[in-house]
């Protein structure tokens, strides 16, 4: 059911871990489904220079976390916000139909972490 | 261990035994007659079906005329529940079951609720066993049917069906048990249990997939489920799956012949496995009663990790196991059985079911005990819920 | 001819083709995984099931998602009829069928009548074919379903299902056809026919017994028949009969590949048989239309004699044939199909069905034409109804 | 399903035919089931000296006709009236459950033929 690429990113996930003093952090997830994704971003001059994640979830959740963090690295915030769950799934050579929501989770986690960064920036500026 | 698969999912399905396949082969080749026909080729097929019926009856201590062949456990359950409900709806519309039944029982009951029947789902105790007293308390004047499984497919707990059947009989209520997981693991005697209906499925005891049986005690009021030809004494229509039925007959004969030896062997392996896992891994719990469980079943929850990931990692190591029921994996909800015994959603998601079979060895258990702790800690390190 | 059996009962069941069994064997041995599981062994089984689904879809010109596997023709018919009736009972309670349907259609309808549905049984013409106009006249405001078989199992007549489907569609009525006898004998294209539901059974086209399929056009309102696990996209629960499904898939692929060749060969043999019997024996009639019938079916009535005796005498000569439907022999009533085309009871009792298959040869027909006249006259001499 | 003996009496039925000027004749049968049995008896001094039959019916009907006519030959009328369908079935090593009624038919046919004989005797005597 899973593509080779999904299995590779599941067995050898890129970017597992935490970033200390990350610029943006967010946790999203659906307790009923049993998946939680936490994403850490390091952002310098509007560019995502590092991304890490921790995920509690199925194989697809792990693989999309891995792929999504890979995809945002080196991108500007604006570019990163353009990344859709479809793009993540396609980069993994597709996901089974009942696993598409896991990639939605990855998209949401990235966006939420960026928002966290932006709101922190804002409060910095207003202080 | 390259290439070799260690199969630990015997509750999902079992390999077909060689002796069983050997008995089936003639009916997949030259003995292709339709048992309803009267020429020799048909009579031979009929004889084979009737020998299988005899073997099933003997294994269950039933009368030959009380055994009906079906397409599996699911059909047997559907037939028992819908057949009894429709045939007795003038007497009442209330049905009692437990919260840990298989979907093949729960979903027909949900369907019957949609048609106006009322169902009480009696909760189980934290050890995964239902208290017969609570079944008794659920009985109403219009209760027509009680359905309680003999052994649970996920946590392996054995239910007090005999006591419940006694209560049912006192009140004149029809009693069904889903024995799909029990047959071939523990002795199953319909007279001793005192049940009116009992479901079984061949592929759970080294027989073929797609064939099962329903025991119907003589005199039980029940409608047919599939209507049509006169097969199965007018109670279950359809050209018989002759090869499958022959396989079921042989498989149940073999399974009951060596039962105590088989069970003793598996129980020893199971205990080694349970002791090993509980001592080697922390934040783990055994689901289901420690003793009143099937000899081949162990079910654990590992906190902070999710079951599918665990299974995939085990698969990469050549180990086939299950998380929750095989029949519901592919579904994204946590197991209703694990929730019913009080587990939190997150914990329920981190469950692992190991069900042993005659092909498993001590070495298999050793191998599992070697790779499982690594995998669990790897997944925990990846988990936002885990603080090491 | 000692020992050799000439099998002339292919409408009852067919031998399993060697190529079909070969494809099944892995799933009866090392590939024993449960398709609902996620490890490799389970994924392989799932793949095999999905390949079979693709083959069935291709053979019927259906979409893959419209094919559901069942335990045979009877389950497919029961599901189609009961599933549509229950799902559409708010729209109406009237169902239309014909007097010559198989029991797997008539008996579920009888059951539905007991539950408050109303059924019109449209009679057929003396040639065994229903007049679409009469179906049209039977339609009421509350008609929810029309079920007309594509080919009759006893007299082989091919029904005008395409015309009837057009009528049904004009009125927004769901249309089902039992194509159990048609698949593998004549082209069956669900889009061309315009039906919403179509039943088939593998053992009628050299596949295994105990497995079939139901085609359900997308958007058709129907309840599941067996409730339980999430198999078959939540519409038909139960662990899949993997080997059986694989066999069904291969068998339908083979059956449709060589269809026109196969049909031409059988039709030639059939015509030789019909001409021979009608010229060599008197007081005989051919039942069912001479032309609009299955290429492999011949059905005769011999006056003054009784069918079972005829079959037994043929059996002694090594010939396997049928009298009336295989699914009702063992029953003592004369065939409802023969009565429906206007035969007297006594004449209906003296019927012989010969259904040919790819294993039959010209010599088989010659042999039958040699022994049949003797047997018929022997039985007539014994008959109090016959004045020689 | 049929015993060897049933098959033997079916394939080689004894006493098939008619008796001209028979002393007792009767036809019984059930048109719905599709079976008709006609029995002819020759009776001398209260003893059945010959019996013949014609039967339209299943294998069991033919075999029980054959066996029943065999059994009555040489018996007195009283003895013949004692013969039950069970006895005929047993003499054939049994019949399938759904074929027992065929042996009932044989019993009825014998009894009816004897009654025909008796009523003819009576009308002879009263004339
Ligand atoms: C307890 C129980 N009941 C019913 C079933 C359904 O049996 P089957 O899948 O053979 O239809 C299963 C197996 O999946 C089971 O474990
Ligand atoms: C026309 C028709 N419908 C339905 C069936 C039932 O199929 P099965 O016996 O495979 O359940 C048959 C065969 O017996 C048939 O000929
Ligand atoms: S994380 Fe819930 S199914 Fe993928
Ligand atoms: S004569 Fe009718 S079944 Fe035997």
Image: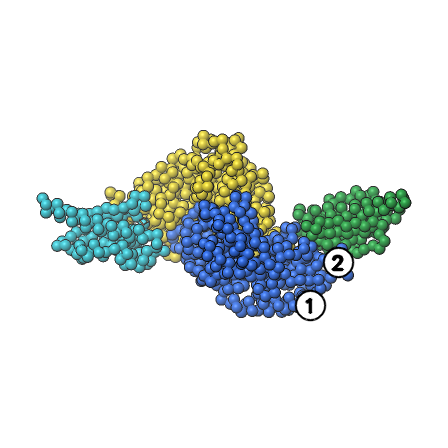
Chain colours: A green, B blue, C yellow, D cyan
Q: Give me the residue at 53% from left, 61% from top.
A: B160
Q: Residue at x 70, y 51 (%)?
A: A31
Q: Quadrant of the C terminus of chain A?
A: top right
The CA span between labels 2 and 1 is 19 Å
Pointer 1 chain: B
Whether residue C83 is situated above or below residue B277 in the rendered picture = above
Give the mark, 2 or 1, whose residue is nearer the N terminus. Answer: 1
Q: Position of residue B86 (x, y in %)?
A: 47, 46
Q: Nearer the viewer, residue C267 or B144?
A: B144
Viewer-nearest residue: B376 or A8:
B376
| Residue wearing tag 2 | B386
Q: Are marks 2 and 1 in contact (CB under 8 Å)?
A: no
Within the image, what quadrant is residue B381 found in? bottom right
Nearer to me, C259 or C82? C82
In the drawing, does residue C282 fall left or right of residue A78? Answer: left
Say left or right for B89 vs B335.
Answer: left
Q: Is residue C259 something that shows in the picture?
A: no
Label 2 chain ID: B
Q: Position of residue D61 (x, y in %)?
A: 29, 51
Residue B344 position in % (x across, y down): 67, 55
Q: Residue at x 79, y 56 (%)?
A: A17
How many neighbours does mark 1 have within 10 angstroms: few (below 14), some (14-19), or many (20 or more)?
A: few
Secondary structure beneath dot 2 equals loop
Residue B279 has which mark?
1
């Amino acid at each position: 059911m899973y593509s080779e690429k999904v299995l590779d990113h599941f067995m050898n996930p890129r970017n597992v871990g935490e970033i200390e003093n990350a610029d943006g952090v967010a946790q999203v997830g659906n307790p009923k489904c049993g998946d939680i994704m936490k994403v850490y971003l390091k952002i310098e001059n509007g560019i995502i220079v590092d991304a890490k994640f921790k995920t509690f979830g199925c194989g697809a959740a792990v693989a999309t976390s891995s792929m999504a963090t890979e995809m945002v690295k080196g991108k500007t915030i604006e570019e990163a916000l353009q990344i859709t769950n479809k793009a993540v799934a396609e980069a993994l050579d597709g996901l089974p139909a009942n696993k598409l929501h896991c990639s939605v989770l990855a998209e949401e986690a990235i966006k939420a972490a960026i928002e966290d960064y932006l709101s922190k920036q804002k409060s910095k500026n207003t202080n | 261990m390259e290439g070799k698969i260690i199969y630990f999912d015997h509750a999902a399905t079992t390999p077909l035994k060689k002796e069983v396949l050997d008995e089936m082969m003639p009916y997949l080749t030259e003995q292709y007659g339709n048992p309803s026909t009267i020429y020799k080729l048909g009579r031979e097929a009929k004889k084979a079906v009737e020998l299988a019926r005899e073997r099933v009856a003997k294994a269950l201590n039933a009368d030959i005329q009380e055994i009906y062949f079906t397409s599996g456990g699911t059909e047997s359950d559907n037939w028992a529940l819908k057949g009894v409900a429709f045939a007795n709806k003038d007497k009442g519309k209330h049905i009692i079951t437990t919260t840990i039944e298989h979907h093949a029982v729960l979903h027909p009951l949900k369907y019957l609720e949609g048609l106006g029947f009322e169902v009480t789902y009696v909760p189980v105790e934290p050890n995964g066993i239902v208290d017969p007293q609570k079944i008794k308390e659920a009985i109403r004047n219009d209760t027509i049917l009680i359905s309680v499984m003999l052994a649970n497919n996920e946590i392996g707990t054995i239910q007090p069906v005999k006591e419940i059947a006694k209560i049912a009989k006192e009140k004149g209520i029809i009693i069904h048990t889903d024995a799909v997981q029990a047959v071939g693991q523990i002795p199953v005697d319909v007279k001793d249990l005192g049940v009116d209906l009992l479901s079984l499925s061949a592929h759970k005891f080294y027989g073929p997939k797609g064939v099962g049986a329903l025991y119907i005690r003589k005199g039980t009021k029940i409608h047919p489920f599939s209507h049509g030809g006169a097969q199965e004494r007018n109670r279950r229509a359809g050209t018989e799956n002759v090869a499958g039925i022959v396989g079921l007959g042989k498989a149940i004969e073999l399974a009951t012949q060596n039962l105590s030896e088989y069970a003793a062997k598996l129980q020893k392996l199971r205990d080694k496995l349970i002791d090993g896992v509980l001592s080697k891994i922390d934040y783990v719990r055994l689901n289901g009663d420690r003793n009143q469980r099937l000899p081949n079943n162990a079910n654990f929850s590992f906190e902070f990790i999710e079951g599918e990931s665990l299974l995939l990692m085990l698969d990469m190591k050549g180990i086939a196991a299950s998380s929750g029921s095989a029949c519901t994996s592919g579904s994204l909800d946590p197991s209703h059985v694990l929730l019913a015994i009080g587990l939190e959603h997150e914990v329920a998601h981190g469950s692992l079911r190991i069900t042993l079979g005659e092909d498993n060895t001590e070495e298999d258990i050793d191998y599992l005990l070697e790779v499982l702790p690594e995998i669990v800690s790897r997944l925990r390190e990846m988990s936002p819920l885990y603080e090491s």
